[in-house]
Image (cartoon, rainbow, N blue to C red):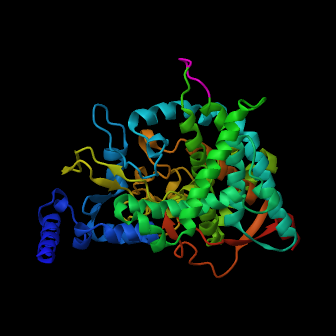
Amino acid sequence: MLRPKFVAFVAATAVYRVCFHPLSVFPGPKRFAITAVPQKWENHINGTWVRRVRGLHRQYGPIVRIGPDHLSIDGSIAWPQIYSHQAGKAEFGKLPGHFGIHNDKLLVGAPRDTHRRQRRHLGHAFSETALTEQQGIMLHYVGLLLDKLSENARQGKKVNLVNWFNFMAFDIIGDLTFGEPFGSLTRNDYHPWIRTLLEGIRGGAMARFTLFYPILTPIFPILVGRKFLRSKKESDELSETKADARIAQGEIDGRRDFMTYMTRKNRDGEYGMTHEEQVINAPLLIGAGSETTASALSGFFFLMGKREDLVQLLTEEVRNAFETEKEITSKSAARLPYLSACLSEAMRLYPPAVETPPRVSPGAVVEGKFVPEGTLLSVYQLSTYRNPDHFADSEEFHPERWLPATHPLYNPKYAGDNRDVFKPFSFGPRDCVGKNLARAEMTVVASRILHRFEWELEPGQEDWIERQRIFLIWEKPPLWVRFRHREETRAN
């Protein structure tokens, strides 16, 4: 008797979800309306979902039902209607537990009031004043990176830019967070903690599967393997140890790092962030403030490297603007319009944050249709940015689409592009707090490399992006590049 009743229950549930559920008014594959298992597995375990959902948006439009209680929404709709601040209305909040057991205390996952308090307190570390103070630290590690590239260039060796950009980005953010680098650039290798942190990112993505199916938690390590889950646990433990050690130091004479701001008291004489919040947010700053920057730079050099004509144009802009490398700072390089256009176009085709963490509907109308409370809402930046409804030649690399009409390289073909959908650092009151620092790093690194070197991609890497899986961020293979000093090129 139990089996027929169970089959009847499953069948009735499937019919309800497909035909009568409040989300049945939204288009999408029927199998995804019946069960979330395929989508969750493909996203959190296989890392192939982000590419699949691009095709679904092409087929079904800007809003696609990708689960019984889950919608994928194009950024043109989601940014203004879901992510923006709307006075007097309930927030589309973050999914509880998405970032683990400390979700409600993390800047990226906390409820509105907690997030507002943390952001107000931590925001001082990313102010214009703070960025000016941080300039010397950033330039120091950029200089170390270029010296390492020079060393390999003199020896005629190819280099894996993914590793070197990670080394630099983690050394910068380590110094800015803890007052000391991880030493990756000097040792030519990852700090052990950074290695476990990177491996733990995939483990964290896999663990999110059990957020939706907790009954599988006991056997989950057997299903997916223990390595990545163990790395996530080790990374969390090492993060806590390092953060506690830095907090115990107190303020460092002569400089202010991120922990300086996190451990300060507010105007009322109270700590703006609790000790627990300080400890668990420190590794968040390390991961979010480094890996995404390294991804953006890797994508930039890959996409530019496929277009020698564009490399020549950009190199001329940089070298005509600066006589010496020392003249290149974040402020001076930010004035280069073609460099800015190339960086934006690279992040359009290869967004560092491919998938934004899901929001949860409070029970609200989206694009004229009611979305019930508890519904998950996701924006996949790759789908939005490669949508031909927003960008002409949406799959092609055309930096000129970002140039003003007065620029000599401007092409009116792209005048109709919907540039407002481009939000690589998210949007609204919860956008990336470190976006200005990230853009400054990218601008300085790209311009200084172009000023010093000629370079080219090693052959056989044409599918570098297509080969990557995505676990919230890109799982990048090596990117092999060969550098030559510009003086050597002239001599030849």
x, y (%) of residue 42?
Answer: 40, 71
The quarter of the picture where the C terminus appears is bottom right
Give the answer, above or below, for where 127 lies relative to 349: above
| x 49%, y 67%: residue | 470
Pick whichever, 404 or 386, lies toward us.
386
Task: Indicate yes or no whether the magenta region holds residue 360.
Answer: no
x, y (%) of residue 10?
Answer: 17, 71
Pick whichever, 128 or 313, lies toward us.
128
Give the answer, above or below, for where 361 lies relative to 276: below
Give the answer, above or below, for where 5 lies relative to 195: below
Q: Which residues are magenta?
A: 264-269
| x 83%, y 63%: residue | 150
Task: Indicate yes or no whether the magenta region holds residue 267.
Answer: yes
Q: Is residue 228 visible?
A: yes
| x 71%, y 30%: residue | 250
Please, which residue is most extreme toward the top here?
A: 268
| x 49%, y 53%: residue | 424
x, y (%) of residue 254?
Answer: 78, 29
Judged by its main secondary structure, the magenta piece is loop
Q: Is residue 335 visible?
A: no
